[in-house]
Amino acid sequence: MPYSLAAIGVALALIIGGAVFFFTSQSDNSEVISMRGLHWHPSLEIYVKGVQQEIPEGIGLGAVHMPMHTHDDLPLIHLEFNGVVRSEDLILGEFFKNWGRDMRSFGANMRMMVNGVENVEYENYLMHDGDKIQLFYD
């Protein structure tokens, strides 16, 4: 049974289009953390001159729930994303944006520890499930 030129053209267009989509999407995958969302819980503690600061519950919750938010189980930060999650979605600075605070507004000489190890990525730190993040200000 012979195929029409139109049918062959459509099939070729689908194959080529699929290949282009596949290979171009692969180049972005270095930034993709998950294609199917995630539900992670890092913790954050803030100390100013040795005194632990209270992080409010309900950050990022309201008429529109943001994927990065807090509940009443502080010091946990909830990272509850659907669909594609990119590294830029999970950086610590995004939490402070949701809170409406500048990470550096707590005091001078900021120091950050992640899982007991000093870290200087600060706002750019890519949070992971189970991380224990501590910020210290003099």
Image (tube, rainbow, N blue to C red):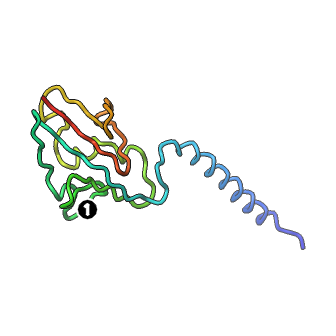
**Residue 46, image x and y in percent?**
17, 41
- Location of the C terminus (image quadrant): top left
Q: Viewed as shown, does residue 9 lie left or right of 54? A: right
Q: Which residue is pictured at 34% across the width and 38% down the height?
A: 125
Q: Which residue is pictured at 19% across the width and 62% down the height?
A: 62
**Extreme residue toward the bottom, this view:** 1
Q: Is residue 40 above or below residue 115?
A: below
Q: Is residue 111 above or below residue 91?
A: above
Which residue does the numbered mark 1 point to in the structure image?
65
Q: Is residue 23 above or below residue 72?
A: above
**Residue 89, image x and y in percent?**
36, 48
| Nearer to us in this view, 71 or 47 | 47
| Nearer to us in this view, 116 or 28 | 116
| Nearer to us in this view, 51 or 101 | 51
**Residue 118, image x and y in percent?**
31, 31
Residue type marked 1: His
Residue 111's image quarter?
A: top left
How many marks do you count on the picture?
Answer: 1
Q: Which residue is pictured at 38% across the width and 43% down the height?
A: 88
Q: Viewed as shown, does residue 15 lie left or right of 105? A: right
**Mark 1: which secondary structure?**
loop
- Location of the N terminus (image quadrant): bottom right
Q: Viewed as shown, does residue 78 lie left or right of 26? A: left
Q: Which residue is pictured at 17% across the width and 59% down the height?
A: 58
**Residue 70, image x and y in percent?**
22, 56
How many residues crowd around disc 1 within 10 Å: few (fewer than 14), some, or many (20 or more)? few
